[in-house]
């Protein structure tokens, strides 16, 4: 790691700590030549899977694409950019945890939609309609409502 002060390549790690998110390491470094101390944050590089459509075509996963869809769906709705980022972080976490190298696009939409459902129903229906035809969305809403009814019954 190059020293930001004198550009010297030779820097020494004096402290290393794993942050709470579990995959970022914070390192205190000292330059051997000018004694300058600095901090680096290093993230483990995790490779997200390739998306596979139902017809077998492959598509590179794009965070931006999902984000644009979420922003569009959330227009004039009480959803913050942070909440959108959180949803995508959870989605990516789920994709990484699956261990799959090829991830079905069929699972991306419903996952995002179910997260959106917890936040805002209007945004959720809008987003769902980008992904599916309305019939499917309708069935999905009914499914969710049934689930909610069952959950409420269990709670009593
Ligand atoms: Zn230096």
Image (cartoon, rainbow, N blue to C red):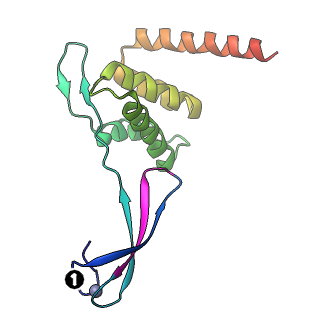
- In percent of width and height, residue 85 lies at 44, 45
Region rendered in magenta: 21-30
- In percent of width and height, residue 28 lies at 42, 73
Q: Is residue 122 left or right of residue 25?
A: right
Per the picture, the main secondary structure of the magenta-coloured stretch is: strand
Answer few, some or many: residues within 10 Å of disc 1's Cα (few below 14, many 20 plus, some between 14 and 19). Answer: some
**Total numbered labels placed on residues in the image:** 1
Secondary structure under the numbered disc 1 in the rendered image: loop
Residue depicted at x 41% and y 68%: 27
Q: Is residue 129 above or below residue 91?
A: above
Residue depicted at x 50% and y 51%: 21
Residue depicted at x 35% and y 89%: 35
User: Residue at label 1?
Assistant: 8
- In percent of width and height, residue 14 lies at 42, 75
- The answer to whether any part of residue 31 appears in the image is yes
Instruction: Write down the quadrant of residue 24 in the picture.
Output: bottom left
Residue 82 included in the magenta stretch of the image: no
- In percent of width and height, residue 19 lies at 50, 57
Q: Is residue 7 above or below residue 73?
A: below
Quick one: 141 or 36, which is closer to the camera? 36
- The answer to whether any part of residue 126 appears in the image is no
Instruction: Write down the quadrant of residue 29 in the picture.
Output: bottom left
Q: Is residue 120 above or below residue 54?
A: below
Residue 23 included in the magenta stretch of the image: yes
Q: Is residue 155 left or right of residue 90?
A: right
Report the quarter where the C terminus lies. Answer: top right
Residue depicted at x 56% and y 33%: 120
Quick one: 154 or 1, which is closer to the camera? 1
Instruction: Write down the quadrant of residue 111 in the picture.
Output: top left
Q: Is residue 79 above or below residue 97?
A: below
């Amino acid at each position: 790691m190059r020293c930001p002060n004198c550009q010297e390549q030779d820097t020494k790690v004096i402290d290393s700590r794993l942050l709470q998110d579990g995959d970022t390491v914070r390192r205190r470094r000292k330059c051997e030549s000018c004694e300058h101390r600095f901090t680096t944050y290093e993230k483990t590089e995790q490779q997200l899977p390739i998306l596979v459509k139902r017809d077998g075509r492959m598509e590179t996963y794009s965070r931006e694409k999902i984000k644009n869809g979420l922003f569009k769906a959330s227009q004039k709705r009480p959803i913050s950019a942070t909440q959108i980022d959180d949803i995508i972080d959870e989605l990516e976490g789920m994709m990484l945890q699956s261990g799959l190298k090829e991830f079905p696009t069929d699972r991306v939409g419903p996952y995002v939609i179910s997260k959106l459902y917890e936040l805002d129903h209007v945004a959720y229906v809008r987003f769902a309609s980008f992904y599916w035809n309305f019939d499917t969305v309708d069935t999905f809403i009914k499914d969710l409502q049934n689930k909610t009814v069952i959950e409420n019954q269990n709670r009593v």
